[in-house]
Amino acid sequence: MGMYTEFKFQSKVQRDIPVHIHRALQTFLMRDAPLDEEKLREICPGEPLFEDYRVCMLGGTYDGIVITVTADLKNYTGTIEKFLDWIVPYLDKDEGTVVGTTHYEEDEHPLYITLTGDGWDSVRDTDNESLQEEYTRLSQITHN
């Protein structure tokens, strides 16, 4: 049956994101119907995220300012990591900011996704109160 990973993500985007990224977020997150593999590839041709059929498992909202993504998926193809690699350069957040969590069903504690100077990192620190507060905040995001 496979093991699932819960993914929760929320962040503001930069004010001047490229138009193709803005359109991709609208198409990808604000869809009314599932996207087939051909339509996925059309969103951002050549982008590894949209070559991964599991990207359709990510749901969320995007209002032009804030992206919210939630999912329970089998992350065997690295879908979560591909999403983070794709979106992090366009986020309006400082280094060290927690923007999400992943929680693999066999792990006792979640991983916190934090921004770094050159991208993102995931950390598991059960004694850090500020990380625990962020996890509580992100835990309140509901699945779409």
Image: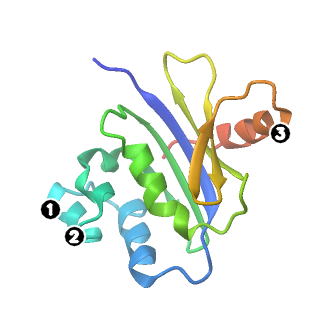
Q: At 57% from the left edge and 84% from the top edge, which residue is drawn?
A: 16
Across and down, in percent, residue 100 comes to 61, 45
* Circle 2 SS class: helix
Identified by mark 2, the residue type is: Glu
Q: At 33% from the left edge and 49% from the top edge, which residue is drawn?
A: 55
* Circle 3 SS class: helix
Q: Which mark, residue 42?
A: 2
Q: At 61% from the left edge and 16% from the top edge, which residue is drawn?
A: 108
Identified by mark 1, the residue type is: Glu
- Nearest to the eye among marks 2 and 3: give it: 3
- How many numbered marks are there? 3
State which tag comes first along the sequence, 2 or 3.
Answer: 2
- Judged left or right of residue 35, residue 92 is right
Identified by mark 3, the residue type is: Ser
Across and down, in percent, residue 82 comes to 39, 51
Q: Is residue 55 above or below residue 21?
A: above
Distance from disc 3 to disc 1, alpha carbons, whole Å, reads 42 Å
* Circle 1 SS class: helix
Residue identified by numbered label 1: 38
Q: At 26% from the left edge and 54% from the top edge, which residue is drawn?
A: 34
Q: Nearer the viewer, residue 59 or 10?
A: 10
The image quadrant of residue 14 is bottom right
Q: Which mark, residue 130?
A: 3
Which residue of the protein is positioned furthest toward the front in this rendering?
118
Distance from disc 2 to disc 3, alpha carbons, whole Å, reads 40 Å
Q: Is residue 78 above or below residue 117?
A: above
**Other residues around mark 2 within 10 Å, as few (<14) / some (14–19) / many (≥20):** few
